[in-house]
Image (cartoon, helix red, strand yellow):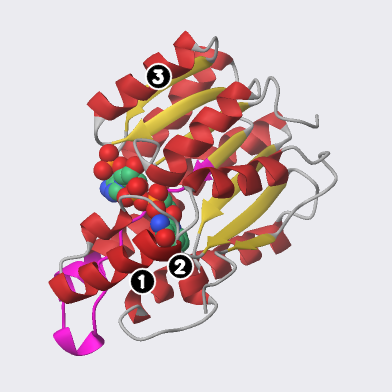
Amino acid sequence: MAGIEGKIVAITGASSGIGEATALLLAERGAAVVLGARRTDRLERLAARIIAAGGYVSTQQTDVTRPQDLQRLVDRAVVDHGRLDVLISNAGISKIGPVDALDVGGWSAMIDVNLRGVLHGIAAALPVFRRQGHGHLVTTVSTSGLKIVPNQAVYAATKNAVRTLLEGLRQESTDGVVRTTSVSPGYVRTELADSIDDEAVRAQIRRGMDEFAIPPDAVARAIAFAIEQPVDIEIGDITIRPTVQN
Ligand SMILES: NC(=O)c1ccc[n+]([C@@H]2O[C@H](COP(=O)([O-])OP(=O)(O)OC[C@H]3O[C@@H](n4cnc5c(N)ncnc54)[C@H](OP(=O)(O)O)[C@@H]3O)[C@@H](O)[C@H]2O)c1
């Protein structure tokens, strides 16, 4: 089963940014998309756009910190479309700042969304993938985990934890049933900076986004490239950043 057309793809963090762009691109290319996020008004508006363009879409309110919400998202795909081919664990928050600020609450929130959220997706999707005999897990990690920079230590740690998790899962899944892909974007023009509480750091990230960030559909195309490969080909890691990002 190669290509995008006819695939059933669930996406967390589909209400904005990279998740929204990925939903639009995959639906345009013939996938049925199952959209998860907390803001259902945004999901419904996106679903209406996809339907108006002739696409197939379902929505499911999803808070990735709640395992039962991921179960409902996966169930929505199976009930509405008969199976789940791909789960894109994309939801993420960025409560960045210096470690010295001791933002224990922000650290926990990032671990809950960026790491636990992915684990909850795996817990919900893996049994379905094993039952079907195929499935593909895609996650949005970050170049923050590749080039470690000040203010992003804990955020990068959550992203690298996910990178490690997927490599471990890959090694446990060489029977050909489960494919894993980690996509590492650099600066992408999205709403991610809104989740930064530290005003100075938020302003700095927004400046970077305004000056040289790439649009989210560039990341969507990278995700589509991984998904469309023939089933015996696994794209493990993709790094995609602005050419001028240092
Ligand atoms: N933008 C960048 O420069 C960049 C670079 C590298 C990696 N990334 C990663 O890319 C991913 C997507 O971020 P983005 O840049 O597209 O930012 P964004 O526009 O802020 O989108 C983040 C998405 O995550 C969702 N989300 C946040 N907390 C959630 C929760 N508890 N449960 C479910 N969904 C939740 C949000 O939806 P709701 O608020 O509606 O729930 C939203 O749809 C993130 O994992 C981020 O870390 C972004």
**The N terminus is located in which quarter?**
top right
Q: Nearer the viewer, residue 15 or 115?
A: 15
* Quarter of the image where one finds residue 205: bottom left
Residue bounds of the magenta highlight: 88-108
| Residue 47: assigned label | 3
Asked if one can make out residue 73 in the rendered structure from this viewpoint, the answer is: yes
Q: Is mark 1 within 8 Å of ligand 1?
A: yes
Per the image, is 128 magenta?
no
Separation of disc 1 and disc 3 at Cα? 30 Å
- What is the spatial separation of the Cα atoms under label 1 and label 2, in whole angstroms? 6 Å
Tag 1: amino acid: Tyr
Q: Which residue lies under the disc numbered 1?
A: 155
Of tags 2 and 3, the one toward the viewer is: 3
Q: Are marks 1 and 2 in contact (CB under 8 Å)?
A: yes
Residue that badge 2 annotates: 159
Q: What residue is shown at x 54% (from left), y 39% (from top)?
A: 87
Disc 2 residue type? Lys
Give me the residue at 64% from left, 54% from top. 181
Residue 16 falls in image quadrant = top left
Percent position (x, y) of residue 236?
70, 59
Determine whether 206 is above or below 80 in the image. below
Q: Is residue 211 toward the left or the right of residue 221 in the image? A: left
Residue 144 appears left or right of 8: left
Q: What is the total number of numbered labels drawn onto the structure image?
A: 3
The residue tagged with tag 3: helix, strand or loop? helix
- Kind of residue at badge 3: Ala
Please provide percent x and percent y for residue 171.
72, 63
Disc on the earlier residue, 1 or 3: 3
Q: Are marks 1 and 3 in contact (CB under 8 Å)?
A: no
Tell me, yes or no, whether the two marked residues, 2 and 3, touch with CB atoms within 8 Å. Answer: no
Distance in Å between CA atoms under marks 2 and 3 = 29 Å
